[in-house]
Each structure stands twice: as C-alpha cells, then as structure tokens.
Image (cartoon, rainbow, N blue to C red):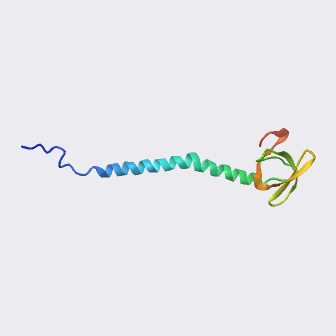
Amino acid sequence: MIPTTGLLQTGGGGGNLTVFLIQIGAFIAIFYFLLIRPQRKEQQRHQTMLKALVKGDEVITNGGIIGKIVRAEEDRLTVRTGQIEVIVDRGRIARRLGDKGKEE
C-alpha cells in the first residue's frame, strides 16, 4: 500500500488571495490616513492663509525674509523689510506672524 497523504489535497489557495487583498487594502488605507490626507489638509490651510493676507500683516517668506505687507495685489505682495521694499510672489509666503512675532 502507498501512502497518499498530501498528494491528493487540492484547493485552499482561495483563502490566501483574500488575505492578500485585505492586507493590500489595509496598507493603502494606512498610507492614505498617515501621508496623503494630512498633506492635503495642510495645503488647504496654507491656500486659505494666502488668500487672507492683507496690507499690514507681518509675514515670513520661504527664503526667510521677515517683513510687513505694504501692498497686496492678486498674485504679488510688496513686503517692507527694514528700509527696503521687496515684491514677492504670493505663493512664496511661508506663514503669517501674529502679535509680537509669534506664528499664527
């Protein structure tokens, strides 16, 4: 007599595919909630801040220049820093400063 244990067993592969798809779905969900969603929220917050900039606001540019807005146009801002006025693209403003130089 020849032992046939394990030779004639078939099936069982469908469960592995289901587990694999669940793992991929979980990975995509984690990636979305930890990386993509917070980045989009930050971009939206930054765009809202840029639209709200007005004359008199104190800002910091991406280059590190700190100054006060003296003229605000649709896509450009004129920033006074010391004795010099610099024209800056509105999108290059990193953040707005609140009272006494603290970030808002």
Residue positioned most to the right: 83
Judge left or right: residue 38 versus residue 5.
Answer: right
Residue 51 showing in the rendered view: no
Quadrant of the rendered image containing residue 89: bottom right
Judge left or right: residue 30 versus residue 71.
Answer: left
Question: What residue is at 37 percent from the left and 48 percent from the top?
Answer: 19
Residue positioned most to the bottom: 74
Position in image of residue 51 (x %, y %):
77, 56
Question: What residue is at 6 percent from the left and 43 percent from the top?
Answer: 1
Q: Nearer the viewer, residue 70 or 2?
A: 2
In which quadrant will I find the C terminus?
A: top right
Position in image of residue 32 (x %, y %):
55, 50
Residue positioned most to the left: 1
Q: Nearer the viewer, residue 89 or 24?
A: 89
Position in image of residue 78 (x %, y %):
86, 54
Question: What residue is at 20 percent from the left and 49 percent from the top?
Answer: 9
Q: Nearer the viewer, residue 10 or 84?
A: 84
Position in image of residue 6 (x %, y %):
19, 45
Question: What residue is at 84 percent from the left and 59 percent from the top?
Answer: 73
How many numbered circles are shown?
0
Judge left or right: residue 25 versus residue 4.
Answer: right
Residue 20 showing in the rendered view: yes
